[in-house]
Amino acid sequence: MKSPKPIALEPRLRAVAEQIQAEVHADIGSDHALLPQYLLQTGRVGRVVAVEKHRGPYERSRQALEGWPAEVRLGDGLEPVREGEVHSLSLSGLGARQMVKILTRYPQRVPVRVVLQPNNSPEELRGWAQAAGFHLIQEAMVEGFWPYTILGLERRVGPDPAYQGLPQAAALRYGPLLLRAAHPLLLQELRAQQGHLERLRGRGARLGERLETLRQALACL
């Protein structure tokens, strides 16, 4: 294995990396492969399967991971990953809806541990997790171009205890573990949203529902 200079990750990817520890890990959409390099360099994983959909990112990742215990495959999502081959999976920097499509296309290939960093609408991913039998084990929020949410999920049996005792709509939208921790970035975001929604109050039932959900979330903090 080569020993390059230490990989420096931006905060959102560092938060993703902190939730990964596995023998074989799959990273979908690695691009420059900074996350896989960091995981290998720090010993958080023993081997990486990186997947790229397009030729350009595939070539960049292949060059970046040359000499590491890693393999870069060209394909769409989990298409080139064999069932049972990997022990954990990460998806970063994509829209939540695109992530759900990747996760639902080959559900039998989704490993027991999944770490997701969507660029929007983490609510959709929390809903997918509940329907697919995944529990929310870790939840982080970090500064960036906007506040990023990172979800650490694990396949387990039964209802997810992370949601117990919380208003379901508020927990799905804003994150049960973030609410329980009274995360300062979430509190900041909720207060900003509250001011915006209060100014728009009375402009439709949907806005009223969003404001009520937000108030329920604030009451949990």
Image: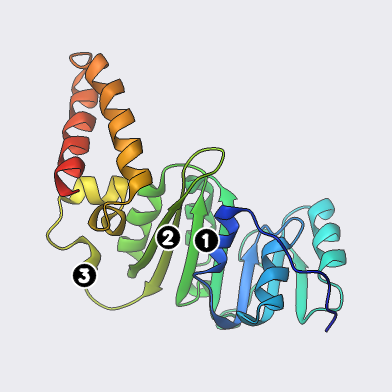
Q: Residue at x 73, y 65 (%)?
A: 7
Q: Amino acid at mark 3?
A: Pro
Taking the image as drawn, is residue 105 in sight? no
**For residue 83, what is the image quadrant?**
bottom right
Mark 3 vs mark 2, CA separation in Å? 17 Å
* In contact (CB < 8 Å): disc 3 and disc 2: no
Q: Amino acid at mark 1?
A: Ala
Mark 2 vs mark 1, CA separation in Å? 10 Å
For the residue carrying disc 1, how many other residues have a C-alpha within 10 Å: few (<14), some (14-19), or many (20+)?
many
Report the residue marked by disc 3.
159
Colouring of the image: rainbow
Dot 3: element:
loop
| N-terminal-most mark, 1 or 3 | 1
The answer to which of 18 and 60 lies nearer the viewer is 18
- The mark closer to the camera, 3 or 2, is 2
Dot 2: element:
strand
Report the residue marked by disc 1.
15
Q: How many marks?
A: 3
Q: Position of residue 53 (x, y in %)?
A: 72, 55
